[in-house]
Image (tube, helix red, strand yellow):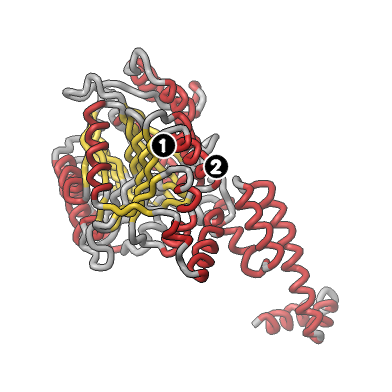
Amino acid sequence: MFTALLDKFIARFPRAGAPLLWLRKHRKARRTIFIAFCHLLGALTSIDAILNVRTSQGAIAWAVSLNTFPYVSVPAYWVFGRSNFEGYVVLRRETAAELGDAERQLARDLFAMRPESEPASATLLAKLAKLPATRGNHTELLIDGEATFRAIFESIEQARDYVLVQFYIIHDDELGRRLKDALIAKSRAGVRCYLLYDEIGSHDLPSAYKNELRAAGVDIRPFNTRQGDANRFQLNFRNHRKIVIVDGRTAFVGGHNVGDEYLGKDPKLGAWRDTHVKVQGPVVQCVQISWVEDWNWAAGSRPTLNWKPETAPGGEDGLAFCLPSGPADEFETCTLFFLHAIHAAKKRVWIASPYFVPDEQFISALQLAALRGVDVRILVPAHADSQLVYLSGFTFLPELDKAGVQTWRYNAGFLHEKAILVDDYCGIGTANFDNRSFRLNFEITLLFAEPSTVRAAEAMFAADFARSTRATATDFTARPWWFRLAARTSRLMAPVQ
């Protein structure tokens, strides 16, 4: 095909095509020039990687691969190498002159609902998120899929003004159709319904599913990371958030997506262990800000919503904080939060994550916490749904075990929750403990200092540890050499995941 195009060009432009005619007759020269061009392109691209990739490990991995095997690495870098999300506007960070009356009033209202004295951590996180900690929230921990989706569908049924929905994965299965039917019913009843999904996470969502929602008046949009000429190859980012908001009064955030497997109906994965949280109070408006920013990127508009925060019934003392994070942030928000949480811990750091692939700074932070007497425990699935994550997880055991960090493998199904318990506060959200969540995904985490919520999270962790087995360094060191090699190789791929 290339030769035929070359012949057409030479025939049409004989003078300009003279050098090409020479190439047409000399196959070895063509091959040499092609190889030289690829390596030159690889060298130039490696300069961009060194200048722009966020981590030194990632920069080294890209630079080596781009110069040694550019034929595959160069197009891979164009697709997966970017670490900054271009064009996304973080509304929280616009100047006051650019904010509307509703946004300015919301800022005043939320500030008025801050606690009189708040932990130093809350002040630090407020600088990262540009959102304050608020009092007057009520929280309900939702353990596993049945409790989560029962509460979500009950709230959607009670909606009077609008329903905002956002999921990374939506399947056209029994649970997915229940969501579709619930939104169609509310839309036909006059309730405004908006549905946002990640087009990569929900790549198999059929057009018929979306068209049926649109026909009923539901506004459904893909997040569309590739919009805009500069973002054509922006495929390495994901909107991993899972959010449902009803009337600006109730919000749901957590680890569940929309699929039958999240109800434990996948025969391969079996029982599904996950956690969501239902919140009421002013923190709902903070979650809503995150949803609106994503919708604004996807649709180029902001729906008219309820921006009046109200104290939740029985939530006068409920202190809560919303931490959205993503590749459009000024700082690596997710990274800095977890590092701060580990470094500031005095009594305990309990972390549950299905994808535990930390880099060296987190390994050091966990080791230091354990060495100064903090109870550090990591809860991961015994059987992961990613072979790379499963294998690389073994390589961390010797480093963590020798410092006193406990690693537990959950045996009663597939653990998918993303939870953290640090001293006297806890967090439930969508962020995994890996490079993708720290730097490439749009995530959201809710943090709570309400004593009843912290006790519920402590009981949840205790029940999970009771269903788990302690993992030690020998689980890796006693393995055959080929297993250790495969595990180490998997770990090397973590920076470029």
Inspect the image, locate mark 2, and give the three-letter code of the amino acid beneath it.
Answer: Gln
Q: CA distance from mark 2 to mark 1?
A: 22 Å
Inspect the image, locate mark 1, and give the three-letter code of the amino acid beneath it.
Answer: Pro
* Residue placed under numbered mark 1 in the picture: 324
Q: Position of residue 492 (x, y in %)?
A: 56, 59
Between residues 51 and 310, which one lies in front from this camera angle?
51
Q: Position of residue 208 (x, y in %)?
A: 28, 63
Where disc 2 sits, the SS reads: helix
**Label 2 vs 1, first from the N-terminus:** 1
Name which quarter of the figure residue 461 lies in.
top left
Tag 2 and tag 1, C-beta contact below 8 Å = no
Of circles 2 and 1, the one toward us is 2
Name which quarter of the figure residue 409 lies in.
bottom left
Eyeballing the image, is 336 above or below 358?
Answer: above
Where disc 1 sits, the SS reads: strand
Between residues 307 and 133, which one lies in front from this camera angle?
133
Eyeballing the image, is 135 above or below 330?
Answer: above
Identify the residue at image location x=24%, y=41%.
Answer: 460
Identify the residue at image location x=26%, y=62%.
Answer: 172
Confirm whether residue 296 shows in the render. yes
Seen from this angle, which residue lies furthest bottom?
Answer: 25
* Residue placed under numbered mark 2 in the picture: 361
Eyeballing the image, is 117 above or below 59?
Answer: above
Between residues 397 and 234, which one lies in front from this camera angle?
397
Q: Position of residue 42 (x, y in %)?
A: 71, 62
Confirm whether residue 197 shows in the render. no
Q: Quadrant of the N terminus?
A: bottom right
Q: Which mark is residue 108?
A: none
Q: Position of residue 211 (x, y in %)?
A: 28, 59
Identify the residue at image location x=40%, y=62%.
Answer: 386
- Count residues near mark 2 (Cα–Cα under 10 Å), then give few for <14, some for 14-19, many for 20+: few
